[in-house]
Amino acid sequence: MRRIRALALAVVLACAAACGGSGGAAGAADGGRVTLRVGDQKGTGMQALLEASGQLENLPYEIEWSQFTSGPPMLEAVNAGSLDLGTVGNAPPVFAAAAGSKITIIGVSEKGLGGQAVVVPSGSAITTVAALKGKKIAVAKGSSANFHLLAVLKKNGLSFTDVSPQYLQPSDALAALSTGRVDAWAIWDPYTAQAQHQIGARILADATGYANGFEFQIAATDALDEPARAKALGDFVARVRRAHTWANDHPTQWGEVYARLTGLPQDVIAMAVPRNRYTDLELDADVIAREQQVADAFAEAGLIPGTVRIADITDPRYNEGAQ
């Protein structure tokens, strides 16, 4: 009997050790809490939005936040296994998928198009898109602004080879625009509002009629294979949707918290919030088709290697609850 009890104890200890090696398995087997590693960026303000709306209360899991300057480096971290989830615009998943990254789109909303813009300095002689030919334009490579710029140029008879793209992250691009080192800047809110407020930048073309306003929740594909982690990801997406509804219904309160948590001036946030209302969508055939247009445009312009099939990187399991 002593030998049997010793053997049973050894088996229990071995199982406990094995379960401890996986965050998802530990969360399911021994009562431990899953920790979601989530990427955020100032232009998205996801942490600020969830906190302002009360959606970070009573979480059944932990969240470990990491800050990024834009979507592309965030998805590099997702692919590298450093993050479970990140929220990005329409272009980053295309570039990531084209590079072979293991990412999956699990949620989508659409924001207003007024804050996605190509801006020029207040005293610029550039008054039409055609006048951008031969000019230096700051843009974050692989970002939603990258697609917006491509679409603006194409619709006005220009190509990417007709301009001189300067691949800069937002903070560097604002400095470059304000000192005249670039002629224009393709960017998104709240940076658009920041440029308008701080240096009097003028919007040459917003995204209306040029681009979609998709904002995606992108998960690490491997994380979706862990039941406990996949459940936490579904809960997170549902909380994001509830936060969107709250922000739409409480723009003043949202703006106040957004300014406080991001450190951006209240005047900047007050300009950005009204033009960035959220509409939550299902990951359906319409969304996939509209995002496929983004992928095809980048492929046609030779800005990504090969082609990307958006349907292949989309998982609609969390569609329930979307408007």
Image: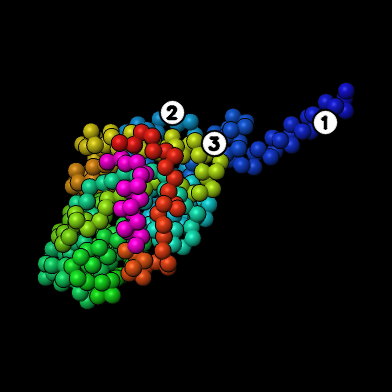
Q: Secondary structure beneath disc 3?
A: helix
Residue range corresponding to the magenta coloring: 279-296
Q: Mark 1 — residue? A: 7
Tag shown at residue 58: 2
Could you give the CA–CA distance between mark 3 and mark 2, rounded to whole angstroms? Answer: 17 Å
Name the dominant secondary structure of the magenta segment. helix
Residue 52 shows in this picture: no
Determine which of the numbered discs, if any, sits on residue 28 in the image: none
Pick the residue in front: 233 or 170: 233
Query: What's the distance in space between the residues labelled 3 and 1, CA to CA?
Result: 29 Å
The mark closer to the camera, 3 or 1, is 3
Q: Is residue 294 magenta?
A: yes
Quadrant of image for the N terminus: top right
Image x and y of residue 280, in percent: 31, 40
Q: In which image quadrant can residue 11 be found? A: top right
Residue 82 lies left or right of residue 172; in this view the side is right
Residue at numbered disc 3: 228
Query: Along the line of sight, which residue is nearer the eye, 126 or 309?
Result: 309
Quadrant of the rendered image containing residue 318: top left
Q: Are marks 3 and 1 in contact (CB under 8 Å)?
A: no
